Image (cartoon, rainbow, N blue to C red):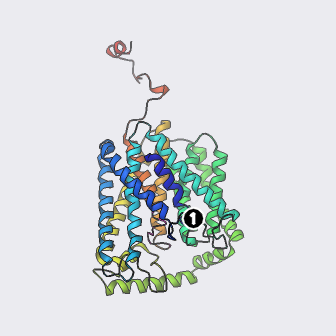
Amino acid sequence: MLQISLLLLIASIWFPGATRIAGTDGSLSFLLALFCAVVGVASYGELGKRIHRTEATLATALLTTAALIIALSLLSMLHADNPMRAMRAIFAQIFGFATIPAVAALSTRPNGQVLIDRLVTAMIVMSVATACLVVVGLGGGRFADRAEGYFKHSNQLGIALSAGLPLVAARLVTTRKHRLLLAGCMVAVLLGLVKSGSKTNFVVGIIGLGLFFALYAIYLAVRRQRPLTVVAGVIAAPVALQMALVILQSLNPRAYRLLMTQVSGGEAHSMVSRERLWTISVNLGLAHPFTGVGAGQPIGDIAPHSHNLFIEYFRTLGVPGVGLITIMVLLVVIFLVSAVVPTLMGQGESRHATVTNVMLLGSAVCVWNYLVANQMSDSFGPSTAPFFWIPLALLIAYRSMQRSPAPAGPDQSRVTYDRPMPAAARTLEI
């Protein structure tokens, strides 16, 4: 039941505009998130003791911070101009309760690796399906120069695709089958990202993809594996970047022109608009330093949010809000470093260890992509929040599985020794 609920939740978050109830985008996703939260917390209570203490402490700290943000958002409804819009901030935090306990509970089961792989597969399938719809232009969504797909804005589509891209790359390098198909999937997601027309997320997605392959190259170099692959990757990286820019110029000239304007030091219209938006938002926060203007409140008729995570929480929830979101981000960044560095420097070389380690690196880059994109493109909105919580839940699960003993395989059925087997051991072996 828990696994099916999570799979349905993953499918629904890619089509918030098509899963609306009573005219509200993403309503079905929120109902599924509530159900997953109830079932996941109950399952976590039974199985959570099997998770390593570090991951359990992190999950508790993150969910406690999310609960405080929810409480602060509810209080802000008392003075907000539009109290119902506070539910946007609440919905975004609810997804944390829906994913972290549920995914952690699944990972502790005997077939936890298989269950987590199914969730990753669902993310990959939905990202490819969404990208293909965007590229081909089918469906009821708007697929113009700045394609929005079934999201409300093209930036939201860009965040979703850039967050899913590292998972596709991680599956590509770890699988032994269907590599050509997965390579095509990665190209499809890249094309969807280009069609979205989101300059920020295109840059974040490409840099994030390069970061993942750089981490994977370090992972191989430390273990002295596949030296030719590392060399080929170093040579291919600048070629791939140039090809990505050519594709962007061909399929979305407007986004390419604005991107080149920013790279060359010019002032693109979007950057000027964001700077003005940030100034207004900071001034609103300074005018209400302790309470903010209320969770989820728009900036007049200018924009629905501040296009920056920290500025948005300062504007809407004041100093307490920006303090809580800063604590959450710091916890995540510290965990990212503490998970990635040991993974790169560890010595696990078995098939099980390699898959877990590389998928951890891919999940870490997904979380990083989302955090970076939210400094320019979004403000932890309810439509994109699942693309932070789900990769983070996967990251916690993979880190916990790293610390667990590998499952016994055909080559692990007998004890082996580097030195001659002691007589006592020979007796036990017999």
As drawn, the residue found furthest toward the right would be: 250
Q: Is residue 378 magenta?
A: yes
Residue 162, percent across and down? 55, 62
291 relative to 152 in the view: left or right? left
Q: Is residue 374 left or right of residue 200?
A: left
Question: Quarter holding the C terminus?
Answer: top left
The magenta stretch spans which residues? Answer: 377-385
Identity of the residue drawn at 52% across and 71% down? 23
Q: Which secondary structure dominates the residues rendered in magenta?
A: loop
Kind of element beneath mark 1: loop
The part of the image, by quadrant, that contains residue 187 is bottom right
Q: Is residue 309 something that shows in the picture?
A: yes
In terms of depth relative to the viewer, which is nearer, 230 or 23? 23
Residue 290, position as x, y percentages in the image: 27, 80
Q: How many marks are shown on the rendered structure?
A: 1
**Quarter-of-image position of residue 320:** bottom left
Image quarter where the N terminus lies is top left
Residue 156 is a magenta residue? no
Please identify the quarter of the rendering in which residue 91 is found.
Answer: bottom left
- Camera sees residue 336: no
Instruction: Please state which of residues 73 and 114 is positioned toward the viewer in this rendering.
Output: 73
In the displayed structure, 304 sits above or below 427; it is below
Q: From what the image shows, is residue 33 above or below residue 117?
A: below
Taking the spot 59% from the left edge, 52% from the top edge, the residue there is: 125
Q: Is residue 361 left or right of residue 181?
A: left
Residue topped by disc 1: 18
Image location (x, y in percent) of residue 28: 49, 61
Residue at left offset 32%, top offset 41%: 50
Q: What is the three-letter code of the residue carrying label 1?
A: Ala
